[in-house]
Image: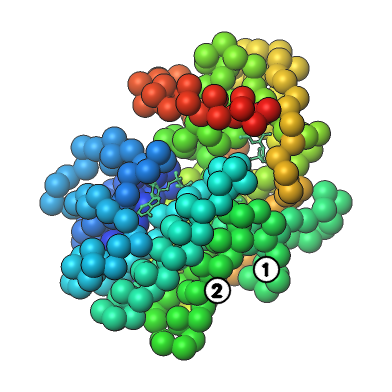
Amino acid sequence: MSDTFEPTNIIVTGGCGFIGSNFVHHVVNNHPGTHVTVLDKLTYAGNPENIAGLPEDRVELVVGDVCDEALLDRLVPGHDAIVHFAAESHNDNSIADPEPFVRTNVYGTYRLLEACRKFDVRCHHVSTDEVYGDLALDDPARFTEETPYRPSSPYSSTKASSDMLVRAWHRTYGVRATISNCSNNYGPYQHVEKFIPRQVTNVLCGTRPKLYGDGRNVRDWIHTEDHSSAVWAVLTRGRVGETYLIGADGERSNIDVLRAILTAMGRPEDAFDWVRDRPGHDRRYAIDPTKLRTELGWRPRHTDFAEGLAATIEWYRENEAWWRPAKEATEAKYAAQGQ
Ligand code: NAD
Ligand code: DAU
């Protein structure tokens, strides 16, 4: 049996990022009894536009750092849960400079857990399937909640560390925490550094998309709206102390995704460049979401990847003002890395 928990006043860290902002919209649109305080540092990945226009009586933005103990001491009391999305999230950045990843993902999670302990506030920690390392292309297995941790990159090792802190703070101090580990998200408002938005905006700019390595790496794609509904399900109906894997049976190779983008945008399937591979590049991720489906009854809504991709491409076509300011600097960074 799951516990039921009806939060009325939550903090969403990283609520101006890609997935956190989607979750804020999800709460505002579907759960009228819940007020959201967004805590976001507004790094290069955070954009207040992502939550602009939401009712002021439902959402408040506090610009600040999850590592700031004094701020958390002022902010956390009076809230009944923290949903923790804030992180440095991009693998390539973590390879170029791991320090912000250690700081925000490890120390920042530690600070939040200490605040949850001090003020007896529930915590849902948003994590990634990358903590499990990778699978071979021909391995029939998928990740489950029992798969041993084996992270590969500086990013995934800091996420794995943060998961370990959450587990320890639950067991040792009784912090009421849950964890979810999700696969690759796609949808509107994703930063142009990530695979799908990078390639879509490259085509829109008249630049050739860039594919790493041999292009056969597999990612397990889920629409960000389905990630949000799953996080709400775990927060409100998940058992304290438990981990839930979130996935929507969306395994696809990078080259297949890229060809689908090129075709949908009216370009030849081979109109892209092969570029230097990512060091330590994980081969395949795959989620077995059985526990989430059977225990919490969660189901994804976006089950047609071609349809979700087409809508995402359309969103980038129509929202150039949103992505254009970040595009040039992002590509300059990639070019300097030979990617
Ligand atoms: P993102 O990079 O788009 O957004 C991160 C947000 O966190 C930004 O708004 C940023 O300003 C904020 N932030 C960063 N450091 C902060 C700090 N020190 N204090 C306060 N705010 C800070 O990330 P995303 O893709 O939306 O990912 C959100 C979470 O979901 C991350 O924890 C990530 O590990 C996890 N996740 C992402 C995916 C994916 O496919 N993108 C999949 C599974 C899990
Ligand atoms: O699995 C969940 C993870 O998914 C999240 O924890 C991360 O926050 C999120 O960034 C994502 O990590 P990936 O490294 O899988 O995503 P990325 O979009 O960077 O790359 C997806 C795949 O595409 C990966 O195999 C690398 C490849 N790639 C990426 C870029 C940016 C390319 O071939 N070319 C590119 O230009």
Q: Is residue 155 above or below residue 291?
A: above
Rendered image: mark on residue 83: none
Residue 181, above or below 227: below
In screen coordinates, is 221 left or right of 60? right
Residue 251 location in percent, x, y? 69, 46
Q: Is residue 6 visible?
A: no
Residue 247: name its quadrant. Answer: bottom right
Q: Type of residue at label 1?
A: Tyr
Tag 2's secondary structure? helix
Image quadrant of residue 73?
Answer: bottom left
State the separation of the CA atoms marked 1 and 2: 10 Å
Q: Quadrant of the C terminus?
A: top right
Q: Sequence order check: which comes first, mark 1 or mark 2?
A: 1
- Residue 326 location, quadrant: top left
Q: Position of residue 244 (x, y in %)?
A: 55, 68
- How many marks can you see? 2
Please say if the residues under marks 1 and 2 sit with CB atoms less than 8 Å apart: yes
Residue named by callout 2: 164
- The structure residue drawn at horizontal position 14% and vertical position 47%, both measured from the top left corner, is 56
Question: Callout 2: 10 Å neighbours few (<14), some, many (20+)?
Answer: some
Q: Residue at x 42, y 71 (%)?
A: 110
Q: Residue at x 56, y 61 (%)?
A: 158
Residue 149, label in figure: 1
Residue lying farthest right?
138
- The amino acid marked with disc number 2 is Met
Q: Is residue 228 visible?
A: yes
